[in-house]
Amino acid sequence: MIKDALGEAGSRMTGAIRALEDDLGAIRTGRASPAVAEKVMVDYYGTPTPLIQLATISAPEPRLLTIRPFDPASIKDIERAILSSDLGLTPSNDGKLIRLSIPPLTEERRHELVKLVKSRTEEARVSVRNVRRDVHNDMREFENEKLISEDELHRGEEDLQKVTNDFTEQINAIGERKEKEVLEV
């Protein structure tokens, strides 16, 4: 019973870490990374669609991203979406290919990105704590329904706290690594 609850907690907390890594992958650093533009939502025939589903995104040079749409008619929609996104990049196109030149980050922009990284890591920590709270409530219900003893509840709570601490440490390490990457000149 408790092992199942702890297993569920672990898988949900792993999901929070995966979501954090996806979010942080989209935060741009000094060099070009296709992950920066993958999640830009493009209004494609009235449907918001992630850019990764509409085009091939590559980084042929350290400071350049190229976007080759599968449908050349969507190039204007893609350009519009990039301009309205929070990437802060200006696209240029030749009718078949969109080029995004990645300028070096200013010191001010680096600090803004570090704040963003910190807020995303805090959101992940909150998510992990919410999972802990849900599983803890489940364990209490088990005890109230006499499915487990009070001693088992206390052992389960301690194990749950250890799992939570492990995931929180992983989140902190991921956040610190991304902060260093953003501040790297």
Image (cartoon, grey):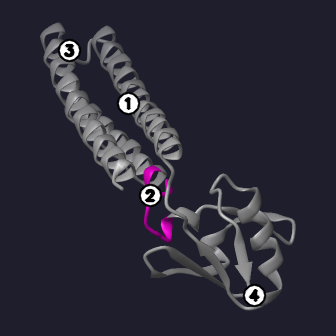
Nearer the N terminus, badge 1 or badge 4?
4
In the shown orientation, is residue 181 left or right of residue 118? left
- Given the image, on which type of amino acid does mark 2 rest? Thr
Does 176 appear in magenta? no
Disc on the earlier residue, 3 or 4: 4
Range covered by the magenta-colored residues: 24-35
Residue at image coords 32%, 19%: 136
Which image quadrant for residue 134?
top left
Q: Residue 17, percent across and down?
A: 36, 45
Q: Residue 67, percent across and down?
A: 62, 80
- Kindly identify which residue carries mark 2: 29
Report the Cα–Cα distance between label 3 and label 4. Answer: 57 Å
Q: Are marks 2 and 4 in contact (CB under 8 Å)?
A: no
Residue 56 appears at what percent x and percent y? 58, 83
Residue 30, magenta (yes or no): yes
Residue 92 in the image, given as x and y percentages of width and height: 72, 78
- State whether residue 20 is above or below residue 128: below
Q: Residue at x 31, y 47 (%)?
A: 180
Q: How busy is the neighbourhood of tag 3: few (under 14 within 10 Å), some, or many (20 plus)?
A: some
Q: Quadrant of residue 124?
A: top left
Res 125 label:
1
**On the rendered structure, is 104 left or right of 179?**
right
Which residue of the protein is positioned furthest toward the right in this rendering?
Answer: 46
Identify residue type, mark 4: Asp
Circle 3: element type: helix
Q: Nearer the viewer, residue 96 or 111?
A: 111
